[in-house]
Amino acid sequence: MKKILLFLLISLSVVYPQIKFDDNFAEKTLRLDFYHTGNKNTETISFDKLIEEPIWSGTKKNLIDQFGYGSYLLKIFDDSTNTLIYSRGFSTLFQEWQTTEEAKNTLRSFSGSVVMPFPKNKVRVEILKRDRRNNFEVKFSYNVNPQSYFIIKEKAKPFPNFKVHYSGEPSQKLDIVLIPEGYSSEEMNKFKEDCNRFAGYLFEYSPFKENQNKINIWGVEAPSVQSGTDIPGKNIWMQTLLNSHFYTFDSERYLMTTDYFAIRDVAANAPNDQIYVIVNTEKYGGGAIYNYYNVTAADNKLSKQIFVHEFGHGLAGLADEYGDDPTYQDFYPLDVEPWEPNVTTLVNFESKWKNLVNDGTPIPTPDEEKYKNKIGAFEGAGYVPKGVYRPTGNSIMRAFSSNEFNEVCKSAIEKIINSYTE
């Protein structure tokens, strides 16, 4: 009882400031491009450019991050008052790369980008990085004058957009933009058909099917010179718009691109809270990173499950619920509670889904038949076989033998959708 009362008092004491959009921002987007450079233990974020984009599709109400998800945190401060007027958590491919074997001996640079509503007045942009103890440290700071004539206003990759599923005003909806990779000009009709197919896939799953009226889906007609994508392990190289490839971090199924600027250039042609790249290939693969971008193969027999699984990562910051992947090393410190909503080290289980566990279900929970459909804490998650726990024996975030999100994941997804629409 004391723990419950303490939790309630803490919850009630957290007050999110109500920032008035019209006082601080114009209805367009400011994009800041940068580079991550470093290795396993070092990181520098260096400024590249500012770009003005004509659409702001994000919320005008929930301007301060509510969730605390992501390995990074973008903060925007009014320069004259030092007031926080916008924040958003996100993760990056660079941070993920830092946990690989290559990062121990190699210095690399990755392109990065953050977007924010276009400020009316001078602001300070900060990018903070979460350390291994879950503390945020400022890694980058830059002062922006919105009147600067160095802010680029031209569209780098202008293409027409089209509506796939439309529910209403973008600033009041979750806007998903589907962009093509490896579709030639002659295959744009195929891409449009694929967009309709994937929209249908999304709405087969809870909680998306119950929230269709809160979601817009857009497509962008952006052809590539050649069809397909790079498969380095097979010595296949294609000239495509986004430079995607399998074998990311030498994992054959990991289909991504390090050309984040190109992704942002294409996505800028439509309202976008979430970017989803559809790659014109039958080969199994995909990937996604929270508030970064999502990728799926278009024509694999498991493309539906890949599409939905990866969107769990990109939209809601869900962790993979399987417990072993040699690509990553020391991914979670076992004495720190992970930020992802669907995994726990039991360090602070009260902050996760402990309230959903029935009396009589042991924690940790044995992976036995009698607990098959129970919510508990099952060992093996987040690429770690021991010491990290998932909510259920199986779900689509663990294996495709399950074709649904568990209740913990559904709740996390629904809260994210509502943050864009309420």
Image: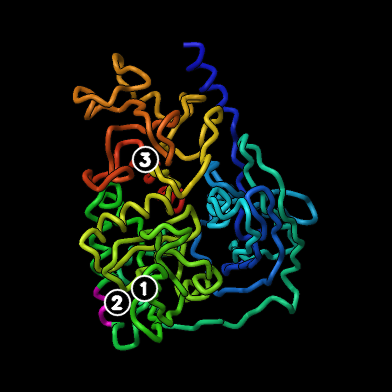
Q: Secondary structure at mark 3?
A: loop
Please name the residue shown 67% across and 47% down the image. Answer: 41
Q: Amino acid at mark 1?
A: Gly
Horizontal and vertical percent position of residue 119:
67, 64
Which contiguous range is marked in magenta? Answer: 189-193
**Camera-nearest label, 1 or 2:** 2
Please name the residue shown 43% across and 37% down the image. Answer: 384
For disc 1, the marked residue is: 219
Q: Amino acid at mark 2?
A: Phe
How does the figure colour the protein chain or chains? rainbow
Instruction: Check if mark 2's residue and mark 3's residue have beta carbons within 8 Å.
Output: no
The answer to whether residue 18 is magenta is no
Of 135 and 9, which appears nearest the observer?
Answer: 135
Q: Secondary structure at mark 2?
A: helix
For disc 2, the marked residue is: 191
Q: Does 174 sit above or below residue 50?
A: above
Query: Can residue 166 be seen from the camera position used here?
Result: yes
Work out whether mark 2 precedes mark 3 in sequence or the reverse, and give the earlier one. 2
Is the residue marked by circle 3 packed among few (<14), some (14-19), or many (20+) residues within 10 Å? Answer: many
Query: Can residue 180 be seen from the camera position used here?
Result: no
Please name the residue shown 55% across and 55% down the image. Answer: 92
For disc 3, the marked residue is: 321
Is the residue marked by circle 1 packed among few (<14), some (14-19), or many (20+) residues within 10 Å? Answer: many
Q: Secondary structure at mark 1?
A: strand
Q: Does 393 sit above or below residue 363?
A: below
Horizontal and vertical percent position of residue 173:
41, 58
